[in-house]
Amino acid sequence: MVNMILSLLSSAWFPLDLSSHQDALILSGNLLAAIAPKSLKNPWANEDDTSTTTKIEEPWPALADRSLVGMVEQLFSHLMKIINICAHVIDDVTPGPVLKATLPSLSTAPSLSPIRRKTKERETAEQMAAPMSPKKSTESSPAARPADAVGTAPTSKSTSLGSFYHLPPYLKLHDVLKATYANYKVTLDLQNNNEKFGSFLRAALDVLSQLLEIATLPDIGKCVEEILGYLKSCFCREPMAATVCVQQLLKTLFGTNLASQYDGSSSHPGKSQGKVQRLGSSSLRPGLYHYCFMAPYTHFTQALADASLRNMVQAEPEQDASGWFDVLQKVSSQLKVSMTNVTRHRADKNTIHNYIRLFEPLVIKALKQYTTTTSVHLQRQVLDLLAQLVQLRVNYCLLDSDQVFIGFVLKQFEYIEVGQFRESEAIIPNIFFFLVLLSYERYHSKPIIGIPKIIQLCDGIMASGRKAITHAIPALQPIVHDLFVLRGTNKADAGKELDTQKEVVVSMLLRLIQYHQMHLDSHEALGVLNTLFETVAPSSLRPVDMLLKSMFAMPATLESVGTVQLWISGILAILRVLISQSTEDIVLSRVQELSLSPYLICCQNISRLRDTGNQTLPTEEHEEDMQNKHLPEETFAR
């Protein structure tokens, strides 16, 4: 099907229908995104073989199924051309061949007169400022731009991957897009998301982001500057999609995308995958017994083993990647491996850092857009981009040397506290995660922002009367993780100041404990609670009396499915703690000493709770139950 779609995209008539063209791009991108992960391989697996050079230089080395390479290359080339066309339309540049520049050849002379030097510098600045002119510096060509204004004879018909001036079908597409964009500019509805030009460009950028997920540095290294040039022009029309594309490009360069991560997932399968593979030894399809007993039991025993291992040797925790700093820790470890892989095959280790310098103009443009836009979603995306750069060890002070951007972000808190910031709950987690990352950065040997200041900002939000569920709790999550998980393990950060900060945060958490986000309302919440119990000292969970009383406590009501799930989740969490932290003899003896009755959880009581709520058991039943001594095994089993 992908071949059929690509054949339509390369035809003379189909691409001119923008709606059909857009749908075909999205469909082809989704199909390749679904197929590619199943056919990935480690692009650096054969680095020690004698044929390493030929292996590495092959296109898209991460794809094990080589039949996909042609389709991916064709779609990538098509995307580059149509994004270049959109950039030409936005910048109002006429498609044409590459100009044969002659003045830059003077730079080979041993010296230049002041007049010639000034002329050369001015022309160089004009070329850099000209739209859609990402220069490709090579030793043989002094300057090149993919498709510029019409001028002298071209040096080549394909000086860049996105060059299209010599292809009649793309020139026709350029005319169609130009007319569509002209109609858009004269319309009064500038915020229409269904506008054809914007939707088409957004779809092209989204599909390009998908392809960058399976690309490696050799695949896009030669066209990074070209892509950034296109994105810089498209940013003013589709800033969200362009920012996402920049993030994907960074992931590809630094080896944190899907293709580069496959080394760890293939050579060392993930723990969750390993669990599934070890559940059954037979090749037959698992049956009811497997799903009801074997699978849950295996998962549970392995989870307990992992928890014991963490408590004993403080190994790397197996956590859900949904947390902010779990992602940060994984990215950091993947970055080390990926940088090693990339630089191992490129003699110049400064190549990656040179690429980062190419991102600076576009990142600065994104920072300026943050301060002028009213779109909260765009601001979130810009913060994610900055957080990604900081995680990649990019010096933040080079991007915001005058601290203007961070000052603007801090100024936003004044509007959030008084309720003048629309959809502020959507950006709160991103802001605090970004600020916590900046607490590790320094400006003139001083931290850009300290943890006390971040805590003060969070306390201000709590005091302003904003909803704790949407503001205070999401703001505290990255702070808590940083103080109690990251800084707590670093001996250099240990001290009275850190202890004081922890005490302040704990006092803030105690003020929020009544909100349902702190309760068990989902599988993820239950997992967080289990992780919490595994993290605290085992001595804090003894004696087990408090756990047993909590487990055998009757809920207030069972009138809805949610209350039943909440009750059962609490029992499961406590039961897990009892099994992992206590012995059978201790638990049974305490059950007997506390005279816990097995009939507290019975059909009669559950029916009463469902119909009338929590009421005291009848006196006769209660006295009879107290007189009958039940075996602790019976009580606990029930």
Image (cartoon, helix red, strand yellow):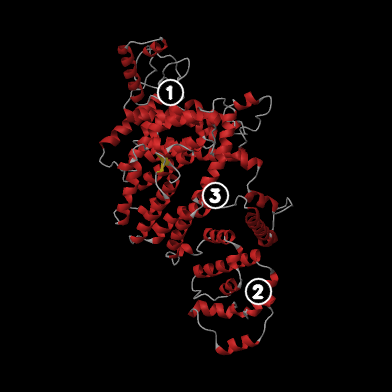
Give the amino acid at mark 1. Answer: Ser
Q: In the picture, which quadrant includes the C terminus?
A: bottom right
Q: Residue placed at 33% from the left, 60% from the top?
A: 464
Residue 272 placed where, x, y %? 62, 51
Q: Hey, which quadrant is residue 535 in on the image?
A: bottom right
Q: Which of 135 and 595 is in front in this view?
A: 595
Classify residue 17 as left or right of residue 289: left
Rendered position, 627 above or below 471: below
Q: Hey, which quadrant is residue 124 in on the image?
A: top left
Rendered position, 121 above or below 25: above
Q: Can residue 68 be seen in this view?
A: no
Give the label, 1 or 2, closer to the camera.
2
Q: Which of 504 and 324 is in front in this view?
A: 504
Could you tell me how far apart the alpha carbons at marks 1 and 3 are, in whole angstroms? 55 Å
Q: Is mark 1 on a helix, strand or loop?
A: loop
Residue 106 placed where, x, y %? 38, 11
Q: Residues within 10 Å of mark 3 (few under 14, many from 20)?
A: few
Pointer 3 residue: 491
Q: Residue placed at 47% from the left, 39% from the top?
A: 26
Residue found at the far right of this picture: 282
Pointer 1 residue: 163
Q: What element carries label 3?
A: helix
Pointer 2 residue: 636
Give the amino acid at mark 3. Answer: Lys
